[in-house]
Image: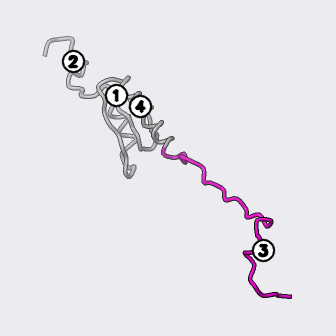
Amino acid sequence: MPRGFDDIKLSRRHAAYVVFEGFEPGVYSTWQETEAQVRGYRNNKYKGFPSPEKARRAYNRYLKEKEAISKPKSKPKKQKPIKRSAVIDDDLPPWDID
């Protein structure tokens, strides 16, 4: 390797990482930071991205989808109470009860 390039990591696969499920979800720039957030966390979810911008977009999209899932889509309909005046004589039994 030519001189002056010792401090540059040419083999770096990802420029940014997203921790979706971990101790502190978010966007991280190094694997060491990411690993600290997911190691020991059960059912962790993380992914590497080629650019920090793509990582931020993916994390924001995840947060929006998570928020949409947690909100109920519609409110349950309330049942209207039965009005007593709606009962007519035809609905009553034929016998007299005192």
* Disc with the residue nearer the chain's start (2 vs 4): 2
Q: Is residue 27 above or below residue 76?
A: above
Residue at x-position 37% and y-position 36%? 34
Query: Where residue 9 appears, x then y in whole percent?
Result: 24, 22
The residue that disc 2 covers is: 6
* Amino acid, disc 3: Asp
Local SS, label 3: helix
Local SS, label 4: strand
The residue that disc 1 covers is: 16
Of circles 2 and 4, the one toward us is 4
Residue at x-position 76% and y-position 69%? 87
Of circles 2 and 3, the one toward us is 3
* Amino acid, disc 4: Val
The residue that disc 4 covers is: 27
In magenta, the rendered stretch is 69-98
Mark 3: few/some/many CA within 10 Å (<14, 14-19, 20+) = few
* Disc with the residue nearer the chain's start (2 vs 3): 2
50 horizontally vs 69: left or right:
left
Mark 4: few/some/many CA within 10 Å (<14, 14-19, 20+) = many
Predominant secondary structure, magenta span: loop
Q: Are marks 4 and 1 in contact (CB under 8 Å)?
A: yes
